[in-house]
Amino acid sequence: MIRRNRILRTSPAIRAMVAETILKPGDFIAPLFIEEGENVQEEISSMPGYFRRSLDLTVKETKELWALGIKSVLLFVKCPDNLKDNKGTEAVNPEGLMQRAIRAIKQAIPEMVVMTDVALDPYSTYGHDGIVEGSDIVNDATVEVLARMSLSHAQAGADFVAPSDMMDGRILAIRNILEANNFTKVGIMAYSAKYASCFYGPFRDALDSAPGFGDKKTYQMDYANTREALKETLMDIEEGADIVMVKPAMAYLDIIHLIKQNVHVPVSAYHVSGEYAMIKAAAKMGWLNEEKAIVESLTSIKRAGADLIATYFAKDMAKLLQ
């Protein structure tokens, strides 16, 4: 033989030297769940080891993430039931929990990149991402609220707004309202290819945002489709998206790869709650090694083409990388 491929696998040092995909803490976006109160930390039952925190403890957690080299957080808030309605009233409240959280984090760690979830499901009495009329989630009226919601986040100091609703035309509406109000440095990370997935279950438990009727298949994408993902993504870029996202990640590595090959903006992927919970559950049963599963899973997402990975393992992985 004149070619022995195993030579490049001989030792850990050689394997590290020729590795094609390298993870680093700056690759990760850490999702944070925030609730009202003080000194509150509640473990999410379906996401072992992950927590809802009050704002004071969220700031403390964000400082720890920054010290580990994680440069970005993605904020989600749990809205009290008494503030939910079908109009998104609390979503645009300048003194709402999201707006206060943005200000607190930017004051504590000014260089942390703060991204914010833009969708109505945490604020909706129906648990849907938009305004409900009868059994329909209406598009255009929802987009108007999402644009105002994004503006309120920008006014509070957000670096990126991250619309996760999948309404048509919302990226252009958000870009226009940001431009009109001189927020020309605020970016948009669009959930461009967000599929109607069963892997979101634990997340909805975390924020009490499960749909009160029906499902989300009239606005989230059919998991049978590929070309549709590319169409949606290209339209979002045309409308002004700075970063595009595929969600979920592990069951959609082909979609991540397809989009990476066809766009010239950063591609992010969301390693979602169900994907997190599966690893945690299997590790608890002793069926796999948790640390190795984390590393392999996140490496596969980056290998597929993701420039950024939103993951509940961000802190764990940053520690492993140390």
Image (cartoon, rainbow, N blue to C red):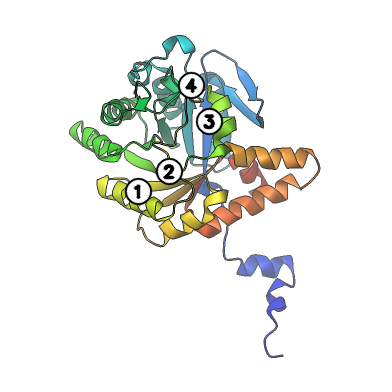
Q: Residue at x 74, y 73 (%)?
A: 10
Instruction: Indicate which disc, 4 or 3, sits on the residue closer to the N terminus.
Output: 3
- Check disc 4 and report its element: helix, strand or loop: loop
- Check disc 2 and report its element: helix, strand or loop: loop
Instruction: Indicate which disc, 2 or 1, sits on the residue closer to the N terminus.
Output: 2
In the picture of the structure, the residue carrying the numbered disc 1 is: 232
Density class for disc 1 (Cα within 10 Å; few <14, some 14-19, many ≥20) is some
Q: Nearer the viewer, mark 2 or mark 1?
A: 2
- Check disc 3 and report its element: helix, strand or loop: strand
Q: Amino acid at mark 3?
A: Leu
In the picture of the structure, the residue carrying the numbered disc 4 is: 212
Q: Nearer the viewer, mark 4 or mark 3?
A: 4
Instruction: Indicate which disc, 1 or 3, sits on the residue closer to the N terminus.
Output: 3
Density class for disc 2 (Cα within 10 Å; few <14, some 14-19, many ≥20) is many
User: Distance of mark 4 from mark 3, alpha carbons?
Assistant: 24 Å
User: Distance of mark 2 from mark 1, alpha carbons?
Assistant: 10 Å
> Is 172 displayed left or right of 285 in the figure?
left
Q: Amino acid at mark 1?
A: Glu
